[in-house]
């Protein structure tokens, strides 16, 4: 692999992990404030407090619109129009327009329902009506496409654009897939002001589940949970033959308990395990392969799984607990297989385990972070035994994590006042870290577009079958 390709890969990984690395000063404070407010909004939305206090309740479509509004705002404040450039005043204006296009749905949701899909036109003169919602929805769609290009890349934009053009120019398509086509009003109304297209199932899953599970993992990682699980893995299997490889697999599996991101898992564990694997005799290719394969499997390790698991639950109409239940055994089997393969590789290379001095004490390591297991236990208990919804379960687990971390810091620092400052900083960093990174991963909205197009084609198929039965 050439040096230029390696450099590009490193830059891409760096951008994915830290999209705000080039942001400083007041700009960074604004982005951080928006990220924290977004996290607090999601916690409030998932909590039972709106129903207990009869205040701050959000319906489905308005909540999704607010969610996307935060994402669009952060996207244009973080990602410039091209690599190497800085955020301009024009980007700030676009972020405000995008947020307003989303918040319009929240403020005027009742009027949208009353009109039943008819877009609002303001009568300026007797001969001219100003299409307010047509322009607003059109701007929202274009801004979402541009945000997708900046954060994800051009291919996804091309796919979404093709389906949009197919919706409008369907009458010119080949006969087998042709249709009457949608007017511009119907297309924009369906895409931006309806709960089936952009604000469909994927973004609904993002609002209800994914954001909170990602936030839980970020808070646990900020509190030191990731390092604890990695140290525990080395303490358990570090002395075995090929110990670093087995520790990488076990550490990635434990990190997969709290993180559904393969990239985050790879970087969290691989930073420590790959150099040690190379030091004990594994080639750099095999060390990287072991780390990546074990980290990718972290997406299917319950209780915090990858985003696809939540989308699956919504699409097939089952609870998240059912997905977790059926994913547990395959996840365990995959890690057992990786463990066995790494053992065979260590035997083939005649590798030894780590030195006793390099392996942490198992008992001390386990007890040093046993408090990290409490929020995970709360999540499993509420999800499996009490059968709470996934959003309620992760809300209670997140609150438990925040409180447990506070108690641990108070005891650790001998009841010093600095404990509250450290706890506050860790919590805020967790809110910022995951919300900012999540602002660049709202690609599920474009996936929602793709889903809406497929759903629309299914409706065409049903209409065709109905007409065939009636008239033929």
Image (cartoon, rainbow, N blue to C red):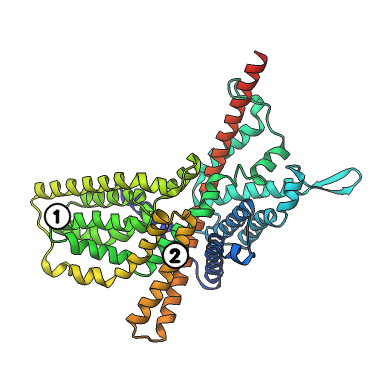
Task: Indicate whether 246 appears above or below 431.
Answer: above
Q: Which mark is residue 350?
A: none
Please indicate whether residue 297 sits to the left or right of residue 218 in the image: left
Task: Indicate whether 57 appears above or below 30.
Answer: above
The image position of residue 94, as x and y in percent, is 64, 57
The image position of residue 221, as x and y in percent, is 37, 65
**Label 2, label 1: how many angstroms apart (C-alpha)?**
36 Å
The image position of residue 335, as x and y in percent, is 25, 48
Q: Nearer the viewer, residue 182 or 412?
A: 412
Q: Which residue corresponds to the image point at 54% horizontal and 49% vertical from the top-left?
A: 203
Name the element at disc 2.
helix
Lower sequence index among marks 2 and 1: 1
Q: Residue furthest left?
A: 350
Residue annotated with mark 1: 242
Task: Indicate whether 460 appears above or below 11.
Answer: above
Q: Residue furthest right?
A: 126
Q: Residue furthest front?
A: 386
Please indicate whether residue 373 sits to the left or right of residue 147 in the image: left
Q: Which residue corresponds to the image point at 63% horizontal and 22% vertical from the top-left?
A: 466
Q: Which residue corresponds to the image point at 56% horizontal and 60% vertical from the top-left?
A: 45
Residue annotated with mark 2: 398
Name the element at disc 1.
loop
Task: Indicate whether 28 appears above or below 76.
Answer: below
Say if mark 2 contacts mark 1, CB within 8 Å: no
How many neighbours does mark 2 have within 10 angstroms: few (below 14), some (14-19), or many (20 or more)? many
Toward which corner of the image does residue 157 lie, by quadrant? top right
Nearest-to-viewer mark from 2 and 1 = 2
């Amino acid at each position: 692999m050439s040096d230029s390709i390696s450099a590009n890969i490193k830059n891409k990984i760096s951008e994915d992990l830290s999209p705000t690395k080039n942001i400083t000063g007041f700009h960074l404070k604004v982005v951080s404030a928006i990220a924290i407010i977004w996290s607090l909004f999601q916690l409030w939305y998932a909590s039972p407090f709106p129903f207990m206090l009869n205040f701050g309740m959000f319906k489905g479509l308005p909540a999704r619109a607010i969610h996307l509004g935060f994402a669009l705002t952060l996207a244009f404040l973080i990602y410039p129009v091209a690599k190497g450039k800085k955020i301009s005043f024009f980007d700030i204006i676009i972020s405000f327009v995008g947020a307003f296009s989303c918040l319009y749905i929240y403020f005027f949701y009742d009027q949208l329902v009353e009109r039943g899909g008819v877009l609002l036109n303001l009568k300026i003169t007797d001969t001219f009506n100003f299409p307010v919602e047509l322009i607003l929805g059109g701007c929202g769609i274009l801004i979402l496409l541009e945000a997708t290009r900046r954060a994800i890349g051009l291919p996804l934009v091309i796919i979404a654009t093709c389906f949009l053009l197919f919706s409008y120019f369907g009458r010119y398509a080949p006969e087998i897939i042709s249709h009457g086509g949608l007017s511009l009003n119907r297309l924009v109304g369906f895409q931006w002001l309806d709960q089936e297209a952009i604000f469909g199932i994927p973004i609904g899953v993002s609002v209800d589940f994914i954001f909170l599970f990602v936030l839980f993992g970020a808070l646990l990682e900020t509190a030191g949970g990731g390092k604890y699980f990695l140290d525990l893995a080395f303490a358990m299997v570090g002395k075995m033959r090929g110990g670093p490889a087995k520790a990488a697999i076990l550490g990635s599996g434990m990190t997969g308990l709290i993180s559904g991101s393969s990239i985050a898992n790879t970087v969290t564990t691989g930073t420590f395990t790959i150099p040690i694997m190379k030091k004990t005799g594994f080639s750099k290719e095999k060390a990287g392969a072991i780390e990546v394969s074990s980290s990718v499997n972290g997406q299917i390790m319950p209780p915090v799984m990858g985003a696809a698991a939540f989308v699956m639950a919504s699409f097939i109409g089952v609870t998240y607990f059912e997905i977790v239940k059926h994913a547990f055994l395959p996840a365990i089997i995959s890690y057992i297989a990786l463990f066995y393969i790494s053992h065979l590789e260590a035997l083939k290379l005649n590798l030894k385990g780590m030195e006793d001095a390099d392996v942490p004490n198992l008992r001390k390591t386990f007890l040093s972070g046993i408090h990290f297991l409490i929020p995970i236990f709360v999540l499993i208990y509420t999800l499996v035994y009490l059968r709470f919804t996934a959003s309620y379960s992760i809300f209670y687990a997140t609150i438990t994590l925040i409180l447990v971390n506070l108690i641990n810091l108070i005891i650790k620092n001998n009841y010093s006042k600095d404990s509250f400052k450290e706890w506050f900083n860790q919590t805020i960093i967790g809110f910022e870290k995951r919300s900012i990174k999540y602002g660049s991963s709202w690609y599920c909205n474009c996936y929602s577009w793709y889903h809406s197009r497929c759903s629309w084609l299914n409706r065409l198929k049903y209409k065709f079958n109905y007409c065939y039965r009636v008239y033929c």
